[in-house]
Image (cartoon, rainbow, N blue to C red):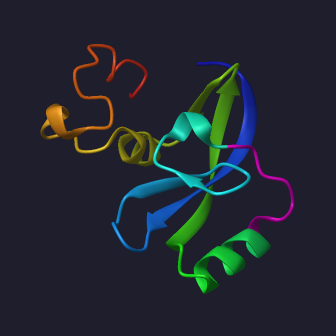
Amino acid sequence: MSGERIKILTGNDLLTGDVTWWTGRGWSRHVAEASALGDDAAAIIATEEAARRVVSAYVIDATQDGASVRPAHIKDRVRALGPTVRLDLSLRAGDPDALIGLV
């Protein structure tokens, strides 16, 4: 996948443990809603972790092609999809194209 290289922020919801992605205004379970970061990643992480909305937040590399956001590293692409041992439990259950672009 080609596209613009961006930095995005990910972490885990403190209450549910769900993988979350920073949207620019809050957190989403869907990587497609992630927004590119400016130079304020450290401040966002500090504020969000102090407010106990997210835990273990960190910045990752990704590409953005139109409305599609794809983490650069396989680890984060797997995190974006959800459980891989049972695709019926993933965030895209029932989507035959869910694994396309994962690897």
User: Image height check: is 84 above or below 2?
Assistant: below
Q: Is residue 37 left or right of residue 10?
A: right
Instruction: Locate residue 80 relative to residue 44 in the image: left or right.
Output: left
Q: In the image, residue 78 lies at what x, y percent?
A: 36, 42
- Viewer-proximal residue among 69 and 72: 69
Q: Is residue 71 visible?
A: no
For the C terminus, the image quarter is top left
Above or below for 26 versus 48: above
**Figure quadrant of residue 71:** top right
Residue pushed farthest right? Answer: 39
Residue at 13% x, 40% y is: 85
Residue 4, above or below 51? above
Q: Does the magenta portion include 39?
A: yes
Residue under the point 71% across and 22% down: 3
The image quarter containing residue 42 is: bottom right
One can see residue 4 in this view: yes
Depth order, front residue of 5/16 = 16
Q: Main SS type for the magenta part?
A: loop
Q: Which sits in the foreground, 91 or 36?
A: 91
The residue located at (32%, 29%) in the rendering is 92
Range covered by the magenta-colored residues: 35-41
Instruction: Where is residue 40? Give x, y as percent.
Output: 83, 65
Q: In what quadrant of the picture does the N terminus appear?
A: top right
Q: Position of residue 57 (x, y in %)?
A: 56, 68
- Tell me: 89 left or right of 45: left
Residue located farthest toward the bottom when viewing the structure as drawn: 50
Q: Is residue 83 left or right of residue 97?
A: left
**Residue at 38% from the left image edge and 48% from the top image edge:** 79
* Picture mark count: 0
Measuring from the top left, give residue 36's x and y in whole percent. 75, 44
